[in-house]
């Protein structure tokens, strides 16, 4: 039982380390020069049910990649069960897959998780940014926290999914009964005007870890 608790604490600390630096666990692994699946949830327990632990080398490389120390990581291990909770994280490509979200706009079947500060905001998930349309506000690999089924208004930063399966982070512009404007922070990307009938859902970005 003690080993199981220590195992959960160590992996939760790795989740927190990644989230604190705006990364998913896959992003942390890639930044460390490791295979992207090294820290995945599926790698934490073997097929035979035995606990798997991150190697000292992979942990050292992860800490070096984000400029953290073993002492700081130890503090995360000690406090992983306080001040936060685990939420699912998905990439934009996965978010575009049909059937990945339930009727409430919440992802189902997400294998990876990150730690999210206990802010009192409920029913949220994390999305890893791709593309450069929102630079310098959000860069590729940054993680934003998304709350579906929440009222949005002009000027809000949002995640939009089209019925064609495109998923994008934008700033909400002018809305009418038939059209919606989606604005980019990066001036290299023009404003997009879309028919409301082409939008599957719009969810508000409520928090960002960068």
Image (spheres, helix red, strand yellow):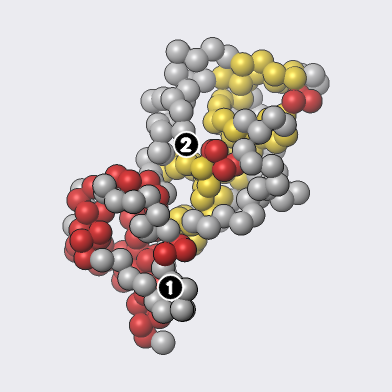
Residue 194 placement (x, y as % from top left): 70, 18
Where's the N terminus, which quadrant?
Answer: bottom left
Residue 54 placement (x, y as % from top left): 30, 66
What secondary structure is found at the residue carrying circle 1? loop
Q: Residue 46 carries which label?
A: 1
Question: Which residue: 45% across, 55% down?
Answer: 114
Where's the C terminus, which quadrant?
Answer: top left
The answer to whether any part of residue 66 appears in the image is no
Q: Nearer the viewer, residue 120 or 75?
A: 75
Q: Which of 205 and 14 is in front in this view?
A: 14
Q: Which of marks 2 and 1 is in front?
A: 1
Task: Indicate left or right for 20 with 183 as reference.
Answer: left
The residue furthest front is 47
Question: Which residue: 44% across, 18% down?
Answer: 186
The answer to whether any part of residue 193 appears in the image is yes
Relative vertical location of residue 66 with respect to residue 174 in this rendering, above or below: below
Task: Indicate left or right for 38 with 162 as reference.
Answer: left
Q: Which of 101 and 20 is in front in this view?
A: 101
Q: Which mark is residue 129?
A: 2
């Amino acid at each position: 039982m003690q080993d199981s608790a220590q195992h959960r604490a160590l992996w939760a600390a790795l989740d927190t380390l990644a989230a604190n630096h705006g990364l998913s666990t896959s992003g942390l692994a890639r930044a460390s020069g490791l295979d992207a699946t090294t820290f995945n949830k599926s790698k934490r327990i073997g097929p035979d049910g035995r606990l798997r632990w991150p190697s000292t080398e992979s942990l050292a490389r992860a800490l070096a990649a984000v400029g953290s120390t073993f002492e700081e990581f130890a503090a995360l291990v000690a406090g992983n069960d306080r001040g936060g909770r685990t939420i699912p994280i998905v990439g934009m490509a996965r978010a575009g897959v049909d059937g990945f979200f339930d009727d409430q706009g919440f992802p189902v079947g997400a294998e990876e998780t990150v730690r999210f500060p206990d802010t009192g905001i409920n029913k949220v998930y994390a999305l890893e940014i791709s593309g450069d349309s929102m630079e310098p506000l959000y860069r590729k690999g940054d993680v934003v926290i998304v709350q579906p089924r929440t009222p949005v208004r002009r000027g809000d930063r949002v995640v939009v999914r089209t019925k064609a399966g495109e998923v994008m982070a934008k700033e909400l512009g002018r809305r009418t009964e038939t059209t919606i404007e989606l604005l980019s922070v990066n001036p290299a990307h023009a404003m997009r005007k879309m028919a409301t009938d082409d939008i599957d859902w719009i969810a508000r970005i409520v928090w960002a870890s960068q």
